[in-house]
Image (cartoon, rainbow, N blue to C red):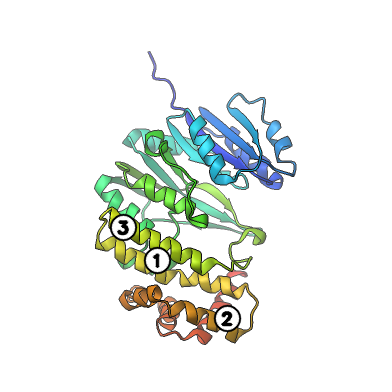
Amino acid sequence: MERPETLVSIIVPVYNTSAFLRQCLDSLVNQTYPHLEIICINDGSTDQSLDIMLEFDDDPRVILIDQTNRGCSFCRDRGLQMATGEYMMFIDSDDWLDHDAIRLLVKHAEAERADAVMGTYVREYEERSLPKRIFEADFLSYNAEETRRFVHRRLFGLVGEELAHPETVDALNSNCITLYHRDLIRHLSFRSPYGSFVDLYFQIQALEHCQRFIYIDYPIYHYRKTNGQSETSVYQRNLVNSRLEFFHMLMTYIEEHDLGEDYTRALYNRIALSMIGIGLNELSSNKPLFAQAEVLRQVLQQKEYKEAYSQMDMRYFDLKWRTFFQLCKHERTVPLVLMLRSVNYLRKRV
């Protein structure tokens, strides 16, 4: 008797993404791997999202749920409870998958008996596509010990030669580029008090107990990055406090799980690197230069940042990043703001 094909459950929370939803769902129903369970949860959308979802109702693999607005985390948790597949994925409804993504992920999961298989992604802007490479390898297969050392620890921050690419500090955070075995995540929840860090916290919990992790350098996921959705396009007043609160939680997590010095060093480096996002966020405030510089000075004078820069090894940075973090370390915030403005100007035009 032939072995039945492995079922993959894909969980798609939907909220007011009618402009992009059809592309997302088309990429799922047209996967080269057909053995899917596509759980679409309309989270109280007020646009045409539900109408578009109903266009796919005749596909027996598609399960449509309509509910009052409860938030993305609630939708993902509900999908987890409903899912019957051996493997699971999460997709945001304004993004889309490469048509061969599931086939490749399942192929490697079954060949290696993996708990988690991660691919890469492409950042899709209005006029350009930018691939994101996560590891400097075409393929990786890690056992439990290696996963903790090279993947799980990296979720807390970068160390050593990894610091040569500070822009990759959050590259592993997304739950949408990973195929998970159900036994790894069915007991977890996305509901947590950590706001924008909920994906990272879920990933930390999932990969802590991963026995076999696979990475393939293939762009399985297309992440839509329009100007209106950019995290640096809208000023976040509480950004510093929310990040510090999460960093304190991570420090407690390291201590309670006895994760060791490498994790602590990685976390301090994450704190230091967070000044990139904090600085770009402050630019969005549209305050005068000296007012922005004063805000950044107040951040850098906090003990967490002083400690982070006192222990940071800057020899791995290229000239621009070494200059940036030296300015942070010595609280030279006026030239720091000017540098951020230049970086932001170029970033929008490259």
Which quadrant would residue 314 be assigned to in this image? bottom left
Apparent side of residue 267 relative to residue 332 in the rendered image (left or right) = left
Q: Is residue 88 above or below residue 240?
A: above
Return the residue nearer the eye: 247 or 124.
Answer: 247
Residue 29, percent from left and from top: 60, 33
Task: Classify mark 2: residues with Cα within 10 Å, few (<14), some (14-19) or many (20+).
Answer: many
Q: Which residue is mark 3?
A: 254
Give left or right: position of 208 versus 145.
right
Circle 2 residue: 292
How far across and how far down the image is residue 14, in percent?
63, 42
Read off the residue under disc 1. 270
Q: CA distance from mark 1 to mark 2?
A: 22 Å
Question: At 27% from the left edge and 62% from the top edge, which residue is drawn?
Answer: 262
Which mark's residue is nearer the viewer, 3 or 2?
Answer: 3
Front disc: 3 or 1: 3
Kindly report the distance in space between the C-alpha atoms of the residues bearing marks 3 and 2. 33 Å
Can see residue 136? no
Q: Earlier in the sequence, mark 3 or mark 1?
A: 3
Query: In this picture, is 335 found above or below 247?
Result: below
- 189, 279: nearer the viewer: 189
Secondary structure beneath disc 1? helix
For marks 1 and 2 on the same chain, the one whose residue lies earlier in the sequence: 1
Q: Which image quadrant for residue 60?
A: top right
Q: Quadrant of the N terminus?
A: top left
